[in-house]
Each structure stands twice: as structure tokens, then as C-alpha cells.
Image (cartoon, rainbow, N blue to C red):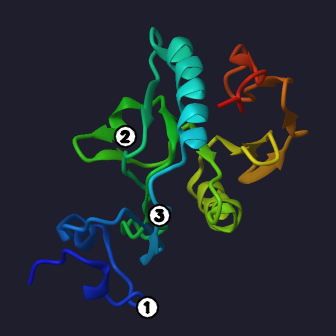
Amino acid sequence: MEITSLSQLDMNASYTYADYLMWKLKERVELFRGKILKMSPAPSPLHQKISQKINQVLYSYFEKGSCELFYAPFDVRLPSKTGEIITVVQPDLCVICDRNKIDDKGCLGAPDLIVEILSPGNSKKEMNLKFSLYEESGVSEYWVVDPSEKFVLIYSLENGEYISRKPVADGEMLQSIKFKDLTFSTQDLYEF
């Protein structure tokens, strides 16, 4: 039977990437350790503007280098410790420096940098589930952009744990930890 609606799935069951590939859903979903999580509806115009602005900065920085920049929807498959793929996420933006991780389905393994922009209703998911997931999976650097409070949290992986830096407030300079010369002003980042 073809799966075209979430109502056809058991939201309490566990699924794999093989299941995920078979679904023909209209809704966007992610898999977190085998559990289905519905994504927020289409992002707000402000969310999209912030994503575009950061994308432009990252594109300019990475376009001539060995790393690749991707934006949602783009599947990032994060294998469990056993190697099974039960987690598929779609970060707003991600940078992958190991091109062997990139295939025709997206990315297999941890990106080097992930940027997530919070939307109303997804803060808990981003801050709790994805934080732990990205930390465990080895994502070197993780940015959480909060449009409502106008700041960016930067986490860098050190000895298997995320270390938080001072929040980058509206109008301040953001500097990457992993990519030392990647800096930009957050002035006008939250303007619509």
C-alpha cells in the first residue's frame, strides 16, 4: 500500500530510512532515532529572509573551497552507533567538507556546520532533540538562530561535547569556531 498521508502511519512506531524513502507524503517530516517528527509548515517570510542572508554569506565563503553548502530541503542521514539509518534531518543550511559523504540522496554522516533557524513551535525540537543528535553524531559546529530574540547561539564540538559561546546579539559580529576566517555582521540579519 502506498503511503501518502501521515494518518496511514503509526506515530508511535519506529521507522528506518528505507521506510522513509517509500513514503509519498505531502507533509515534510524528519526521522529522529526512528520516530516521525512533523516539520513546521512552510517557513515564515522572516525565516526565509534570514536563511537567504546567511546562505549568501556562506556561499561567498565556501564557493571556491573544498566544502559544499546545501539548504533545505536536503536530507542528512545520521547513522546510529550500529550503523543503521533511523535518523534523517533537513537542516536549514549545512556545510559538508568531506565530499565522500555527499551522494544522490543527500548527505550520509555528520556535516561540518549546521545552521538551524527557529520557527514558532519548533524551539523545543531544535534546542533539545537536534542539539543532542548533532552532538552525538559529530557535527563540528552548530548554529541556532533565534529570530524572535535576535541572537545566534554557536556550539562547537570539543572532546565529543558541545561548548557554547557567548550569544551573538543583533548587530554584533559572528565568527565561526571551525572556520576561523568566516566572520560577518548580524546587522540587518533580522530585518524583513
Question: Few, some or many C-alpha atoms within 10 Å of disc 3 (few <14, some 14-19, many ≥20)?
Answer: some
Residue at image position (30%, 67%) is 17
Q: For the residue marked with disc 3, what is the amino acid?
A: Met
Element under disc 2: helix
Element under disc 1: loop
Numbered label attached to residue 138: none
Q: Position of residue 16 (x, y in %)?
A: 32, 74
For mark 1, what is the residue? 12
Element under disc 3: loop
Q: Residue furthest right?
A: 166
- In front of the other: label 1 or label 2? 1
Residue at image position (73%, 27%) is 176
Q: For the residue marked with disc 1, what is the amino acid?
A: Asn
Q: Earlier in the sequence, mark 1 or mark 2?
A: 1
Q: Earlier in the sequence, mark 1 or mark 3?
A: 1
Question: Few, some or many C-alpha atoms within 10 Å of disc 2 (few <14, some 14-19, many ≥20)?
Answer: some
- In front of the other: label 2 or label 3? 3
Numbered label attached to residue 101: 2
Q: Indicate whether 108 appears above or below 88.
A: above
For mark 3, what is the residue? 39
Question: Few, some or many C-alpha atoms within 10 Å of disc 1 (few <14, some 14-19, many ≥20)?
Answer: few
Q: Is residue 122 left or right of residue 3?
A: right
Q: Position of residue 18 (x, y in %)?
A: 23, 69
For the residues marked 1 and 3, what is the alpha-carbon distance in whole angstroms?
A: 16 Å
Q: Residue furthest left?
A: 1
